[in-house]
Image (tube, helix red, strand yellow):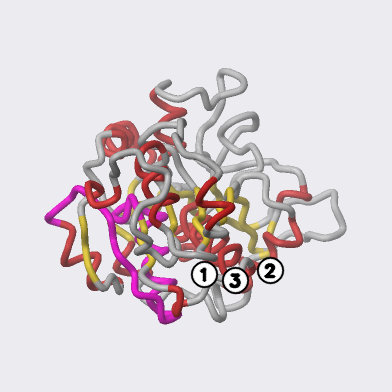
Amino acid sequence: MHFSSVNYKDALAATGRGRILRRFPLIGGIDLAGVVTESVDDRFQAGDQVLVTGCGLGEAHDGGFSELARVPADWVVPLPAGLSLFDAMALGTAGFTAALAVDRLEQNGQQPSLGPLPVTGASGGVGSIAIDLLSARGYEVVAVTRKTDAAGYLEHLGAASVKSPDCLLTDGRPLQSAQWGGAIDNVGGRVLAGLISSTRPWGSIASIGMAGGSECDTTVMPFILRAVSVLGISSANCPMQRRLRVWQRLVSDLRPVHLSQVVAGVVGLDELPALFGQLLEGEHQGRFVVEMQS
């Protein structure tokens, strides 16, 4: 193994603050990238560069925070041409999830002309890469974060403006003034409910996370009267055909422009416990790559 990465789910699993682990003990790390040393599957040979994200790594199967890993061949993605192992983990689950969200939004008819598109949880890994991808495709991206000191970083990635999540909280009426063309939401809870009630007709919302709560108090009115769509994004169990296609897009039309700026640091295994705490407290921005010592 050469590299892994650090995700919010890794922090939840390692600290026990989320019901992530399906067995214990377990090696953490929901991402990995490296070189095949041995394969009993004809699709892969020793020396092949590969990556795995999700698929139960770090949840039900020993994960990427290790020097060696044995995984089912059906989970393995050949490293796309033009992508290094390091950059594969700079993207990791966060980058793949962001790209999957953009892919699903646009398959559902999302386009820049529908209007401004908020990205909540903007300074995290998924949010940072989503801003990069969307702005490069011509969207007017509204970065939504409580971190006022992250504004310069988010604008550098392509955000047209930076706002507090308070702008999305409503008085509870099922239909608010329609101001957003769509959204990528990492927060859930009241923020997602506010987005649903204030999205313009035929806009789509990619629902990725629930850091702000799993409940969403809304009605069917935005769906029926405005044709608003909420698209669930589950990167961990994404079908392989779509998974391969999205990874190919990440080295072509969805290749991030600012990936090196999104990488906040490269860490070793001994630095992970402190980093997990920072992630859960929201004291980070961007992505961290884990480098293995062999």
The relative height of residue 81 versus residue 266 in the rendered view (above or below) is below
For this orientation, the residue located farthest to the left is: 149
Q: Of callouts 3 and 1, which one flags the residue occurring earlier in the amino acid sequence?
A: 1
Is any atom of residue 291 visible in this view? no
Task: Find residue 33 and report its image quarter.
Answer: bottom right
- Whether residue 100 sits left or right of residue 124 in the image: it is right
In the structure shown, which secondary structural element does the residue marked by tag 3 occupy? Answer: loop
In the picture of the structure, the residue carrying the numbered disc 2 is: 245
The residue segment tinted magenta is: 120-149
In the picture of the structure, the residue carrying the numbered disc 3 is: 109
Marks 1 and 2, how far apart at CA: 17 Å
Marks 3 and 1, how far apart at CA: 32 Å
Task: Find residue 23 and report its image quarter.
Answer: top right
Q: Amino acid at mark 3?
A: Gly
- Tell which tag, 1 or 2, sits nearer the viewer: 2
Q: Nearer the viewer, residue 189 or 76?
A: 189
For this orientation, the residue located farthest to the right is: 42
For this orientation, the residue located farthest to the top is: 24
Q: Amino acid at mark 2?
A: Arg
The relative height of residue 123 versus residue 59 in the rendered view (above or below) is below
Q: Nearer the viewer, residue 9 or 176?
A: 176
Q: Of callouts 1 and 2, which one flags the residue occurring earlier in the amino acid sequence?
A: 1
- Structural crowding at the residue carrying mark 3, measured as other residues with C-alpha within 10 Å and reported as few (<14), some (14–19) or many (≥20): few
Q: Of callouts 3 and 2, which one flags the residue occurring earlier in the amino acid sequence?
A: 3
Q: Residue shown at 58%/56% (left/top)? A: 34
